[in-house]
Image (tube, rainbow, N blue to C red):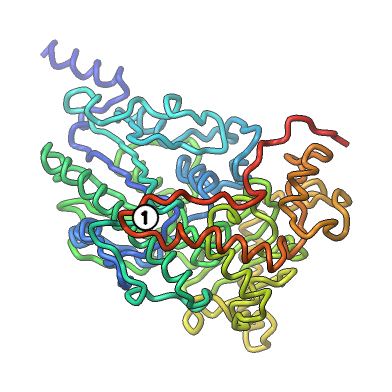
């Protein structure tokens, strides 16, 4: 009897309960920069048998979204269970990250308190708050480091779907086997780039397969809850960084043997934040501040309700590196409304990252400047944005026809705008756009030279680059300069599956950060 009491006291002292060994292990797999372009979601050309098998053993969510279309802000939300704007982590690549507000603590800390061994089995943390180091957030680097019978919470990220993409020498994909969405011009150049991305996902699929095989070999699969998601949408120029579904829609697959019926499909509106709420519920962990997500397995009593009765999902985009913009969105099953807080800025204002990493952006700019895009494709290359974009997702799943000014949808627009503003005010306490962020009166009214990236390179010491970002001038290059970029990209895009071709450096997209700033 005395020995039993000592064991119980030891478990309590370690933050564990006597039932700790009955709780499931939790494995959270994330892939980078990738939407639901998997064979189990019906994507043409690609074969992802390992992820497909995972889906067949559990539940596939068809309407899953992240809260932000870029890695650090989306990951900040998923590391805490709160919208990134609410915790002050909404500016991508924050220069001066701050501690979490409101008494919020990272999910791994809450699980450690509940007796779980927490580990990050990959390198990247990428959070815009403190603590933001791997060793400060997690207890170890592999579940094998845990104590005997201790449940684990393991996160791992596979980066292969983040550009640059590696080709698949085992199963190369032919150009004619892929299906391009209508927002992209159907050229061999863009088709090859698209196929290269699908091949990169095939390589990641094999990595996922090896990890799941390890669970089986170690006898852990039967008591491990597995999540598989993307950190945000696909890294194409109209996807990542923008609030269209292409930028926020992700795959989400959940397997829990004995708890989730195999081959299940769910079409509720679900958020990546729901994983956080589900994890705490399953682990019997406690957050001092109610999370923004909902349990995937029903109403967990936190006042947020269940995913089945959710009407809307919300997302936000703010600074992306040195590219300043701000957007908010609300999505129902049938409609999407995007509020552009900086409509004066073009969609394709300068992004050194995208101009130096996304081959189709160069190709589409060439076609735009030649006048060879369709009207639907060309609207993304306008010199400003509408304040409000509204899409009927049933009729227009690619979000190409803005119906915000159509009288037929006046009431729908008003309802969505009211709900969006309510969320901005009551949930995330939206800071909006300051004059400093908008960089008012910082830059000349028009571009002094034709290459905007070159101007930034030559003038980055003369203004506060970190505070004002890049100028909003558009177009960012001349037709000849974009044609040159396409030719630099061509050998890389069309490289063979076994060829080692160096990725080119596009002029004025790679340069050191300014060392001296003349602050005003």
The answer, for residue 162, to whether it is visible in the render is no
To which quarter of the image does residue 188 belong?
bottom left
State the residue in front, 146 or 496: 496
Q: Say which residue label 1 marks.
A: 299
Quadrant of image for the C terminus = top right
To which quarter of the image does residue 95 belong?
top right
Q: Is mark 1 on a helix, strand or loop?
A: loop
The relative height of residue 403 versus residue 36 in the rendered view (above or below) is: below
* Residue that appears at 50% across and 76% down: 398
State the residue in front, 302 or 363: 363
* Residue that appears at 14% across and 45% down: 222
The relative height of residue 367 versus residue 436 in the rendered view (above or below) is: below
State the residue in front, 198 or 61: 198
Number of marks present in the image shown: 1
Q: Where is residue 119 in the image (x, y as percent from the top left)?
A: 33, 31
Q: Position of residue 35 (x, y in %)?
A: 41, 61
Q: Where is residue 160 in the image (x, y as percent from the top left)?
A: 37, 49
* Residue that appears at 85% across and 51% down: 443
Q: Position of residue 319 (x, y in %)?
A: 66, 49
To which quarter of the image does residue 51 belong?
bottom left
Q: Count residues near mark 1 (Cα–Cα under 10 Å), then give few for <14, some for 14-19, many for 20+.
A: some
């Amino acid at each position: 009897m005395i020995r039993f009491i000592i064991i119980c006291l030891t478990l309590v002292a370690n933050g564990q309960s006597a039932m700790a060994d009955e709780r499931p292990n939790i494995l959270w797999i994330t892939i980078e920069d990738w939407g639901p372009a998997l064979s189990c979601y019906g994507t043409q050309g690609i074969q992802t048998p390992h992820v497909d098998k995972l889906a067949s053993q559990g539940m596939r969510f068809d309407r899953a979204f992240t809260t932000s279309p870029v890695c650090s802000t989306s990951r900040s939300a998923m590391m805490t269970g709160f919208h990134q704007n609410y915790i002050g982590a909404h500016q991508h690549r924050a220069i001066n990250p701050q501690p979490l507000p409101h008494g919020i603590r990272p999910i791994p800390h809450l699980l450690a308190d509940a007796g779980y061994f927490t580990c990050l089995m990959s390198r990247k943390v990428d959070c815009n708050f403190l603590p933001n180091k791997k060793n400060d957030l997690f207890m170890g680097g592999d579940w094998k480091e845990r104590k005997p019978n201790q449940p684990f919470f393991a996160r791992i990220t596979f980066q292969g779907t983040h550009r640059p993409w590696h080709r698949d020498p085992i199963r190369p994909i032919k150009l004619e086997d892929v299906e391009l969405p209508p927002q992209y011009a159907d050229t061999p150049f863009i088709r090859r780039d698209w196929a290269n991305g699908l091949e990169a996902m095939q390589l990641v699929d094999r990595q996922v397969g090896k990890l799941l095989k390890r669970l089986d070999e170690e006898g852990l699969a039967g008591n491990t809850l597995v999540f598989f998601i993307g950190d945000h949408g696909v890294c194409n120029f109209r996807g990542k960084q923008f609030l269209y579904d292409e930028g926020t829609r992700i795959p989400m697959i959940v397997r829990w043997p004995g708890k989730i019926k195999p081959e299940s499909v769910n079409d509720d509106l679900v958020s990546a934040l729901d994983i956080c709420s589900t994890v705490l519920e399953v682990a019997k962990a406690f957050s001092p501040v109610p999370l923004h997500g909902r349990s995937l397995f029903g109403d967990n009593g936190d006042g947020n309700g269940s995913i089945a009765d959710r009407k809307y999902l919300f997302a936000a985009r703010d600074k992306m590196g040195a590219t300043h913009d701000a957007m908010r969105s609300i999505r129902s099953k049938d409609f999407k409304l995007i509020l552009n807080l900086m409509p004066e800025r073009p969609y394709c204002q300068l992004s050194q990252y995208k101009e130096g990493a996304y081959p189709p952006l160069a190709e589409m700019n060439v076609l735009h400047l030649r006048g060879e895009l369709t009207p639907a494709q060309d609207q993304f290359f306008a010199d400003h944005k509408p304040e409000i974009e509204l899409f009927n997702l049933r009729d227009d799943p690619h979000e190409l026809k803005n119906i915000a000014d159509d009288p037929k949808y006046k009431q729908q627009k008003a309802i969505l705008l009211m709900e969006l503003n309510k969320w901005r005010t009551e949930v995330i306490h939206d800071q909006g756009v300051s004059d400093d962020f908008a960089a008012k009166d910082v830059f000349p009214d028009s571009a002094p030279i034709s290459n905007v990236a070159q101007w930034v390179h030559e003038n980055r010491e003369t203004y506060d680059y970190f505070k004002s970002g890049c100028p909003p001038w558009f177009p960012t290059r001349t037709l000849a300069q974009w044609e040159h970029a396409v030719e630099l990209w061509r050998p890389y895009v069309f490289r063979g599956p076994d060829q080692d071709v160096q990725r080119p450096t596009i002029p004025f997209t790679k340069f050191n950060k300014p060392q001296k700033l003349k602050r005003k």
